[in-house]
Image: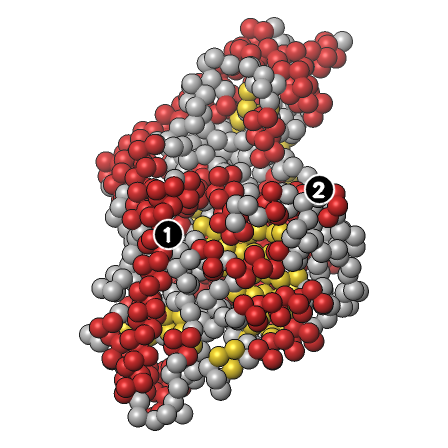
């Protein structure tokens, strides 16, 4: 770490009214700073917003939309907000966040009657939504298992790679998606799990895999769990869509429950962005199942040590909303109804999209649209086809062909189907030839 | 064994992160080669292989057996030891556990009214009510945060007419209050100025060291607090800043220095700016008390504006925890004032790239509150008035405490530092043993560095506190 050579910088006098060009410095601090590439996911929305075309469609970022194409704030959330208005003092939460919120979160993930919770051996800390929860785990992994690596499915949410990279944890991938069947490459997955070194750390999507929408069946989860047991692997579940996938929160958490039943000590990164529509509030929870209460307390204390120099303590508002809802039987019941409503609309759109593609005249196999689950459909479109969808039809999605079903509604599904059919005509012709 | 030692070392490093003067190099992954060729990794310490367990061969038929099987699976995290209580936030936790009637919490810097109650500003209540009625959606903010907030915060800091704003030379990104904004700045420094050291004041807010350590940025200290005068060791400060390699980064408190309450005078700020320019240093201002220190937003920003006016490029981390009482909502910003709008655009894009794998995008609630308050002239004026009232109460309490100390202390000790210091905190000059006495004997909770939060003090308790301070100062070594 050599001392820096003397930098020369021109200082800008306060009386200068000349243009910016005159004050550009030479040999400045910033010469190594390049413009960062647009975030592949959030950058899509930026581009969409800049487009003025009347038929434009945003099927990029995974934020739910109503059938009118509008963002939705759940009624249970509105009621909770009215209830909490003016009731709190805005004091700092503890570093680990709201204890009440953490308890509710963990019950939701592991089950109300989960023995790990009854035994008080789960360390839970409120996090900045799913991203923050994953990052806390990644930093924790780096600090306490510095020799460990992370195994990530292919494909996965792009930001997973950023998170573990910035946490300085080396990454490996395991097979997951089969582009031929547009379903799960189960054999490949099991083989890669087997080949990984004993006691590896794996990132698993609990339900509604992002970006593919392809989930293992319960039977497949049981096999995965058994193999994990054999290999002594550790599972971190990223659960961003509990309730949002099937409409049933217990069903969507099945994978985690299967692992718990098999005696695994898992970790779970939960997000309330989608299932409670609290996107911008940044509410989530990281929990880690431990041997006993004492260890859980120790692990929690260390997670707090990671949070403290990142943001000190998490924001209150979103956590209060979640606790208020989960604490009140009526609000909680309302929430279940609403989340099922969102899941049902998505399922309906899947059916409609497939139907419209057939009606548009496409002869390609679109079965995966309805086989896949959750917010996203991995369409199978290649980057060139995606680019055409955007440039020609003003339809915005990520270049891996991931379509956010939430951005589809009864008014635009036909337009989308026709556009997809258009850009895949060549593919169809090739198949026919 | 090696893995066990590595794990222990990591734990020790994690616990020892607040050691004074510690430098931190970059972490390196040393186990890459283990995974090439997929050789079996070293077992984690304490891990029992499943085959060794007596229960492994029993099929899982019932929950009871599952529970027993679990007991033999040793956790990955067996080696994780209990982290020490946070020196600042841990104080409030200890205070809560105390059952004494006379207990007084002068630990964390959260404002209290004269009745020692938390205080939600009227403008905040109004803003929240307005937001509730507007029924806005809860969509993700962009990675850089709420645009209206970013505009307002840069203007509050620098003045809406500031040439650097007009010339678009400020990169502003909403951050998770002061901590999160500092962390973004530190992460940027680590990535783009690798090896450059940050100089922090001795003492400084404890979490500064944690932030720099976790970001992997080396740091060292410059002299600041002079225990003899209970004031600023200006010569020491200047000497240490001059001594640092050219092109270092100097962390400065914009106003109301935490924990001492001691700020440089305007003349001293000029001299500090001179030295920074001579040495090509980059200042990094931590502005957590703008408006809260003197009661005036503009006066409290004068140090930053002074530097900016000279054309110095710098970082500024802001927080609205104290001045708008938005502690819980984590609202602040990192601002980087640079040489050109092109650079500002690039810097902003890279700050976003650092934020995305930390939390993706910042929380919306606090940002909307600030934007609403600042955006409405009536609410803005009301805010100013409330800020003046808060700052005023602190000044009143300082005066009373000083009066009590001067009256009760029969020696000729000069307690006027209580009046000279500014902002929420006062560095009493009490050492750790004396601070412990404050807590153990007098149930006065404060941090071990002798810092008291005047925001937690009211007029009624000044006499009592004076007694406690005098007792601790004279009767404990």
Which residue appears at 37% of the width and 52% of the height? B384
**Displayed quadrant of residue A158:** top right
Q: CA distance from mark 1 to mark 2?
A: 34 Å
Labels 1 and 2 touching (C-beta < 8 A): no
Mark 2: secondary structure? loop
Chain under disc 2: A
Residue A267 in percent (x, y) is at 48, 51
Residue B124 in percent (x, y) is at 33, 47
Numbered circle sitting on residue B384:
1
Could you tell whether A367 is left or right of A253 in the image?
right
Numbered circle sitting on residue A19:
2
**Displayed quadrant of residue A188:** top right
Mark 1: secondary structure? helix
Residue B191 in percent (x, y) is at 68, 55
Compared with B108, B383 (above or below) is above
Which residue appears at 36% of the width and 28% of the height? A340
Which residue appears at 22% of the width and 73% of the height? B460
Which quadrant does the N terminus of chain B fall into?
bottom right
B446, B305: nearer the viewer: B305
B281, A244: nearer the viewer: B281
Could you tell whether A217 is left or right of A156 in the image?
left
A167, B32: nearer the viewer: A167
Compared with B51, A109 (above or below) is above
Q: Specify few, some or many for label 1: CA neighbours under 10 Å numbering under 14, 14-19, or 20 or more.
A: many
């Amino acid at each position: 770490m050599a001392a820096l050579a003397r930098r020369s910088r021109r200082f800008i006098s306060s009386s200068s009214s000349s243009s910016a060009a005159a004050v550009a410095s030479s040999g400045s601090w910033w010469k190594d700073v390049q413009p960062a590439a647009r975030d592949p996911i959030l950058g899509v929305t930026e581009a969409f917003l800049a487009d003025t075309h009347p038929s434009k469609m945003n099927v990029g970022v995974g934020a739910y939309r109503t059938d009118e194409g509008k963002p939705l704030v759940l009624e249970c959330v509105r009621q909770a907000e009215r209830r909490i208005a003016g009731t709190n003092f805005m004091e700092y939460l503890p570093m680990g966040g709201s204890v009440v919120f953490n308890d509710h979160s963990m019950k939701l993930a592991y089950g109300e009657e989960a023995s790990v919770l009854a035994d008080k051996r789960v360390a839970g800390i409120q996090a900045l939504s799913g991203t923050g929860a994953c990052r806390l785990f990644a930093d924790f992994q780096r600090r306490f298992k510095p020799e460990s690596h992370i195994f990530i499915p292919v494909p996965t949410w792009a930001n997973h790679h950023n998170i573990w990279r910035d946490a300085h944890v080396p990454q490996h991938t395991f097979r997951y998606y089969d582009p031929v069947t547009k379903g799960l490459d189960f054999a490949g997955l099991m083989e890669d799990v087997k080949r990984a070194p004993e006691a590896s750390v794996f990132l698993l999507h609990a339900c509604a895999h992002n970006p593919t929408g392809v989930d293992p069946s319960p039977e497949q989860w049981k096999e995965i769990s058994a193999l994990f047991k054999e290999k002594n692997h550790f599972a971190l579940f990223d659960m961003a869509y509990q309730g949002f996938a099937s409409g049933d929160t217990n069903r969507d958490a099945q994978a985690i429950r299967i692992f718990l039943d098999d005696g695994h000590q898992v970790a779970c990164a939960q997000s309330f962005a989608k299932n409670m529509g609290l996107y911008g509030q940044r509410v989530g929870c990281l929990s880690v199942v431990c041997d006993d209460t004492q260890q859980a307390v120790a692990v929690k204390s260390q997670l707090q040590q990671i949070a403290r120099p990142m943001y000190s303590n998490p924001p209150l508002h979103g956590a209060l909303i979640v606790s208020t809802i989960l604490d009140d039987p009526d609000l909680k019941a309302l929430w279940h109804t609403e989340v099922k409503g969102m899941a049902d609309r998505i399922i309906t759109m899947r059916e409609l999209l497939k139907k419209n593609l057939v009606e548009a005249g496409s002869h390609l196999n679109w079965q995966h649209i309805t086989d896949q689950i959750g917010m996203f459909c991995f369409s199978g479109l290649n980057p060139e086809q995606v680019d055409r969808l955007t440039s020609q039809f003003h339809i915005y999605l990520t270049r891996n062909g991931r379509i956010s079903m939430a951005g589809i509604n009864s008014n635009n599904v036909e337009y989308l189907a026709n556009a997809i059919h258009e850009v895949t005509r060549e593919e169809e012709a090739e198949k026919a030839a | 064994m090696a893995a066990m030692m590595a794990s222990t070392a990591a734990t020790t490093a994690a616990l020892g992160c607040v050691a004074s003067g510690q430098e931190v190099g970059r972490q390196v992954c040393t186990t890459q080669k283990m995974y090439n060729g997929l050789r079996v990794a070293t077992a984690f310490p304490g891990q029992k292989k499943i085959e060794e367990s007596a229960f492994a061969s029993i099929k899982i038929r019932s929950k009871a057996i599952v529970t027993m099987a679990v007991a033999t699976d040793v956790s990955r995290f067996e080696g994780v030891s209990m982290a020490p209580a946070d020196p600042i936030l841990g104080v409030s936790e200890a205070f809560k556990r105390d059952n004494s009637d006379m207990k007084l919490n002068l630990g964390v810097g959260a404002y209290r009214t004269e009745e020692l109650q938390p205080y939600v500003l009227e403008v905040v209540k109004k803003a929240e009510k307005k937001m509730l009625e507007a029924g806005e959606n809860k969509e993700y903010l962009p990675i850089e945060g709420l645009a209206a907030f970013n505009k307002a915060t840069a203007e509050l800091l620098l003045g809406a007419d500031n040439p650097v704003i007009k010339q678009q030379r400020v990169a502003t990104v909403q951050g998770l209050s002061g901590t999160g904004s500092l962390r973004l700045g530190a992460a940027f420094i680590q990535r783009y100025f690798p090896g450059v050291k940050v100089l922090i004041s001795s003492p400084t807010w404890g979490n500064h060291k944690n932030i720099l350590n976790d970001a992997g940025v080396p740091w060292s200290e410059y002299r600041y607090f002079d225990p003899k005068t209970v004031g600023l060791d200006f010569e020491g400060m200047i000497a240490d800043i001059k001594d640092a390699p050219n092109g270092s980064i100097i962390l400065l408190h914009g106003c109301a220095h935490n924990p001492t309450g001691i700020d440089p005078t305007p003349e001293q700020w000029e001299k500090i700016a001179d030295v920074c320019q001579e040495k090509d240093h980059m200042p990094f201002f931590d502005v957590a008390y703008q408006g809260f220190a003197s009661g005036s937003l503009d006066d409290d920003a004068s140090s930053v504006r002074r530097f900016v006016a000279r054309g110095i490029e710098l970082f500024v981390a802001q927080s609205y925890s104290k001045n708008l009482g938005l502690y819980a909502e984590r609202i602040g910003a990192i601002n980087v004032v640079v040489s050109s709008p092109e650079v500002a655009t690039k810097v902003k894009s890279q700050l976003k790239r650092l934020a995305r794998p930390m939390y993706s995008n910042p929380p919306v609630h606090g940002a909307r509150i600030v934007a609403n308050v600042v955006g409405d002239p009536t609410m803005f004026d009301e805010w100013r008035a409330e800020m003046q009232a808060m700052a005023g109460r602190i000044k009143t309490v300082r005066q009373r405490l000083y009066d009590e100390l001067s009256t009760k202390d029969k020696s000729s000790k000069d307690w006027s530092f209580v009046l000279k210091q500014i902002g929420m905190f006062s560095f009493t000059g009490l050492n750790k043993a004396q601070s412990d006495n404050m807590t153990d004997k007098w149930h006065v909770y404060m941090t071990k560095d002798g810092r008291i939060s005047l925001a937690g003090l009211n007029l009624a308790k000044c006499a009592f506190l004076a007694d406690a301070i005098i007792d601790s100062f004279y009767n404990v070594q």
